[in-house]
Amino acid sequence: MTVTRRSALKALVAAGVGTVAGTGAYGFMYGRHDLELTSSIVSVAGLPRALGGLRIGLITDTHRSRWVSHDDVSHAAAMLMNERPDLIVLGGDYVTWGDREYVAAAADALASLRAPHGVFGILGNHDDDHDMPAALGAHGVEVLKDARTRVQIKGEALELVGIRYWTRRAADIAALTHGANGTIVLLAHDPRRLAEAAELGVPLVLSGHTHGGQIVLPLVSALAAQKYPVVAGLGRRGSTTMFVSRGVGTIYVPIRLSCPPEVAVLTLQPASTLTG
């Protein structure tokens, strides 16, 4: 039997299509549910020694929807509670496209979250400014909408500054940090706020939004890296440290490839000198 160039090409295309389909099926059936608990040591410039060892739990981008179930989100909450963090941060995008049908459900799935020093949340670009904060507030979450709150821990102050997705100017963020007497932690859904935080000398930024790339392939990863200063995990600019969570849910397509959903536990440690 003679193998022609055309038949060989058809066979290669068919194999490629089969591989893509199989990979997509895996990402849909398993990858998006393969929740990971990650632990990171986070160096923070100027952090008082008394706050060394403080453990912050971070859950973000739950995207409660038709494709992200109550069990998906409540499992993430239960996983974090098993770690007994000192403080919990919720990083926004609790629903998708502001879908009011899932606002209450999104908050209900996180209702088990409790921490000795509180549970704090910010809003993402998919969240509305009224119903979502009210639903979270009913479960004890303090939602920071361009606001700052001080948490006293072991005689030291931790200043949590939470900004809306659309708050981008350094001057607007500076107005929120003005007068802060403790270590500032900027809670910003979009990791692109690293630039403003570094300009203002904010020592720590916690973010989400990127989903870690969600579908991590060579070309997709390269594009994400061009758009965001940190796509997932730890990054640094000057004396500012950033952590970006891969999040829990999905957007656009209910698939994750080489990028499992994440619940993060961050242990803060003082850093005398950080270099960018």
Image (cartoon, rainbow, N blue to C red):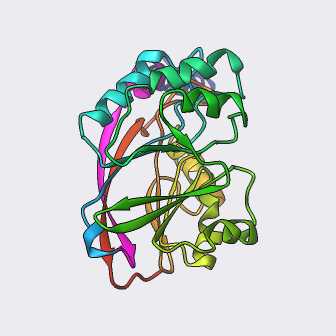
Q: How far from the left and from the top, in percent, is residue 37?
A: 30, 40
| Residue 35 forms part of the magenta stretch | yes
Of 127 and 153, the residue lying toward us:
153
Residue 119, percent from left and from top: 44, 42
Residue found at x 68% / y 50%: 164
Horizontal side of 148 relative to 28 (left or right) equals: right
**Spot occupied by residue 245 in the image (x, y as percentages of width and height):** 46, 47
Kindly indicate the quadrant of the structure image that contains residue 54: bottom left
Position of 13 relative to 228 (above/below): above
The part of the chain drawn in magenta is 26-47
Q: Left or right? Give the position of 184 relative to 43.
A: right
Q: What residue sits 26% from the left and 74% below the top?
A: 49
Tell me the quarter of the picture where residue 98 sits.
top right
Give the image location of residue 276, x and y in percent. Answer: 48, 80
Q: Is residue 212 visible?
A: yes
Give the residue at x 59% y 26%: 135
Q: Nearer the viewer, residue 223 or 32?
A: 32
In this rendering, position of residue 30 left or right of residue 190:
left
- Residue 40 sits above or below residue 98 on the image: below
Count of number-bearing discs: 0
